[in-house]
Amino acid sequence: MRKIYGIGETVLDIIFKNGQPLAAKPGGAMLNSIVSLGRIGLPVHFISEYAGDQVGTLIDRFLHENGVDTSFVYRFRDGKTKLALAFLDDRNDAEYTFYEKYSEKRLETEFPAIGRDDIVLCGSIYAVTAEIRTRFRDFINRSRDNGALIVYDPNFRSAHRHELARLKPLIIENMQTGTLIRGSDEDFRNIFDANTPDEAWEAVGNYCGCLVYTASARGVYVRTRSFSGQFPVKRITPVSTIGAGDNFNAGMIAAIWLKGISADEPECMDLVRWTEVISMGVDFATEVCMSYENYIPEQFARMLKEKMKIT
């Protein structure tokens, strides 16, 4: 069976509003995506690292309860699981403070053997982190060589702009390996000083043949070498936007898996195919924005499983 893998960091998100804690949820960009996919019953595997402490055990149990295989997670003993304090502003966008104490050994796990058309999701600051960079790069390159469909989300925020000179070559290297690049308008503004979808495509198109550009309420734009399109999003008043982009990725991947879209197809898909993919991305992101959860609600997941006849 075609499998889905996410490789990324693991944190415990503690969410604050008006100075008060509201919720504590397992988080991390790829974890959020993988949990949503696990909730609808797709074959998902997580590649990451977290400690053997109480927080790590809580997260590990949560992943298993949501259908996520953690065989490729490195549980280290000489550190602590990373914490992320998320402070919501008046628009319910988050500003983060992180607390971390990793092991000296990083990501000491045996990586899976990736098959043709398996899906690999990667990105965020984890994908350009020096301590795990060599192991990450070797795994992604091997996955691409084996015919995997690689979704790369740079998720590059303003907090890291002071490191851009060092990190940009690594981001570009990741883009060159990707099948599909999905990023927000903020990402491409921070990386390439690109302020429009076409400016972003002018930059990204040098490295990858498929771009999905999300611009909040302004919609979603797709650019490939054979297709250009714009898609609407739903008008909502969000409770929290923390997992919006992560779950847009999850929705796209769900559609790719359910529709049997191969690794060779994204660059040459037509309007009908892209509408299927983007619509599910929008649905997942919309659901997540309506709660303090980082993943699609279980009720929505059950409804989707029944509709798509996922067993």
Image: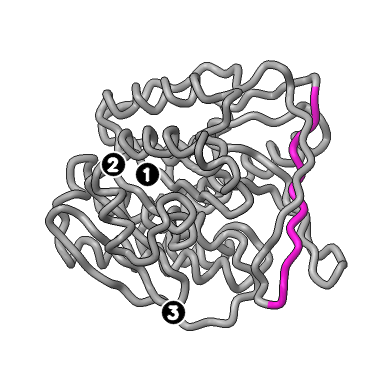
Q: Secondary structure at mark 1?
A: strand
- The alpha-carbon separation of the residues under discs 1 and 2 comes to 6 Å
Is residue 84 located in the magenta-colored stretch of the structure? yes
Q: Residues within 10 Å of mark 2 (few under 14, many from 20)?
A: many
Instruction: Give the image location of residue 187, x and y in percent.
Output: 47, 55
Residue 178 picture location, percent across and down:
32, 39
Cβ–Cβ below 8 Å for labels 1 and 2?
A: yes
Count the labels in the image: 3
Q: Which residues are magenta?
A: 79-90
According to the image, label 3 marks what residue? 234
Residue 241's spot in the image, x, y percent? 60, 66
Q: Looking at the rendered structure, which numbered label has been put on residue 179? A: 2
* Foreground pick, 126 / 246: 126
- Asked if one can make out residue 265 in the rendered structure from this viewpoint, the answer is yes
Q: Is 159 above or below relative to 131?
A: below
Q: Residue at x 74, y 27 (%)?
A: 102
In the image, taking residue 199 as reference, residue 10 lies left or right, namely right
In screen coordinates, is 65 left or right of 266? Answer: right
Q: Which mark is residue 151?
A: 1
Name the residue: 42% across, 34% down: 169
**Camera-side residue: 277 or 169?**
169
